[in-house]
Amino acid sequence: MSDKILTKENLPAFIEELKGEYEVIGPKRSGDMFVFDHIDESEELELDYPTTRLPPKKIFLPQREPLYEYEKKEGDVVIRDLRERWDKKRVLLGVHPCDIAGLLCLDKVFGLEYDDPYYWERRNSTVIIGITCKEPCEHGFCDAMETGPDAARGYDLLMTDIGGKYYLRPGSELGEKLLKADYFGEATEDDTRRRDAAIEGVRRKMKTDLDISGIEGRMKERVDDELWSEYTERCVLCGACNFVCPTCHCFTIRDETNFTGTKGRRVRVWDACHFKNFALIAGGLNFRGKKDSRIKHRIYDKLYYSKEKYGEFFCVGCGRCATFCPAEIDIKEVARKVQEA
Ligand code: SF4
Ligand code: SF4
């Protein structure tokens, strides 16, 4: 597979070509933030964005997803599948390396122990075009988590801004096929040097002061450590960190019925392990009823259980939880304290 060059003047032509076959989703401005959304015109695309409010998981695991509806009719029950059908395959364009890593984590959750058909239907119908970041984002620490600022896998194409043009690296056969138009040029050795220098420049600016090596062992030793009490006091259990995290994937199932119970729908919605009733089970037992157990659980899920279960940390260093936490709890600082304690 060979790397290509796309001049910035030709980006609209590439978007138009993609739109012929795919629905294009990419980063777009929304007030003072950025969101992944449908792209009608190439001018809407904001490829220099720092990070989006919600990660691309919302495309594959929607925040609220009707599964089916039922209606009792003359002694019978009629069931109608409400699964969202896409008219076109999609291109998710402009995904940062940390979010690509987040999707690879979700693939393990929804593909290893059991296949979630709803997730995979969307995942298999989506082309991923990543982009390496031009600048470090405020709270990001992908360098410490080894999920950025470059990406080695998980994309069909990976773009890097090298000045007046984009460097395009295919990561799959499909990605390579997308580079057939005559407005793509061959990447020269000088282009490749500029790509590597651009990414190294971001890495040098980041230099996150966090050594994550061996943290799973330290986490194991510190289950009952005093350091957790500070976070238990500060956290207001809003669940924002769960919702904005590219790897948090918990959901609950709700049955929404009419008053007589003759009609209703079953809906899957995001849930958060910080919520009091998250671990409430039949019989009224709540195995994480205490606040401190819920605070610790999320951090352990990112930096310990995931490593044990899937072989990698489920924190990809995107920094969103620090950005949106009203109590200013930053998992990077928590990790640092665990390592230093
Ligand atoms: S735990 Fe925080 S920094 Fe880590 S991936 Fe989730 S939102 Fe990003
Ligand atoms: S965002 Fe902050 S305050 Fe809200 S649940 Fe997460 S850690 Fe607690």
Image (tube, rainbow, N blue to C red):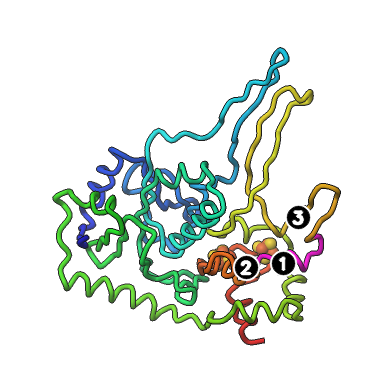
Label 2 Cα neighbours within 10 Å, binned few <14 / some 14-19 / many ≥20: many
Q: Position of residue 188 (x, y in %)?
A: 15, 68
Q: Which mark is residue 279?
A: 3
Q: Name the residue located 79 percent from the left edge and 50 percent from the top edge.
A: 281
**Image quarter in which the N terminus is found:** bottom left
Q: Which residue is mark 1?
A: 295
- Label 1 SS: helix
Q: Tell us which disc is closer to us: 3 or 1.
A: 3
Instruction: Identify the main secondary structure in magenta.
Output: helix
Q: Position of residue 230 (x, y in %)?
A: 74, 76
Q: Is residue 326 visible?
A: no
- Check disc 3 and give the amino acid type: Ala
Looking at the image, tell me whether mark 2 or mark 1 is earlier in sequence order.
1
Mark 3 residue crowding within 10 angstroms, few (<14) / some (14–19) / many (20+): some
Q: Amino acid at mark 1?
A: Ile
Q: Nearer the viewer, mark 2 or mark 1?
A: 2
Q: Which mark identifies residue 151?
A: none
**Closer to us: 263 or 111:** 111
Give the residues drawn in magenta, as a range: 289-299
Query: What amino acid type should be assigned to the residue bearing mark 2?
Result: Tyr
**What residue appears at the point 77 percent right and 53 percent down from the top-left corner?**
277
Q: Quadrant of the C terminus?
A: bottom right
Q: CA distance from mark 2 to mark 1?
A: 14 Å
- Among numbered discs 3 and 1, the one appearing first in the sequence: 3
- Residue picked out by circle 2: 305
* The residue at label 1 has a CB less than 8 Å from ligand 2: yes
Cβ atoms at labels 3 and 1 below 8 Å apart: no
Residue at figure coordinates x 36%, y 44% from the top left: 24
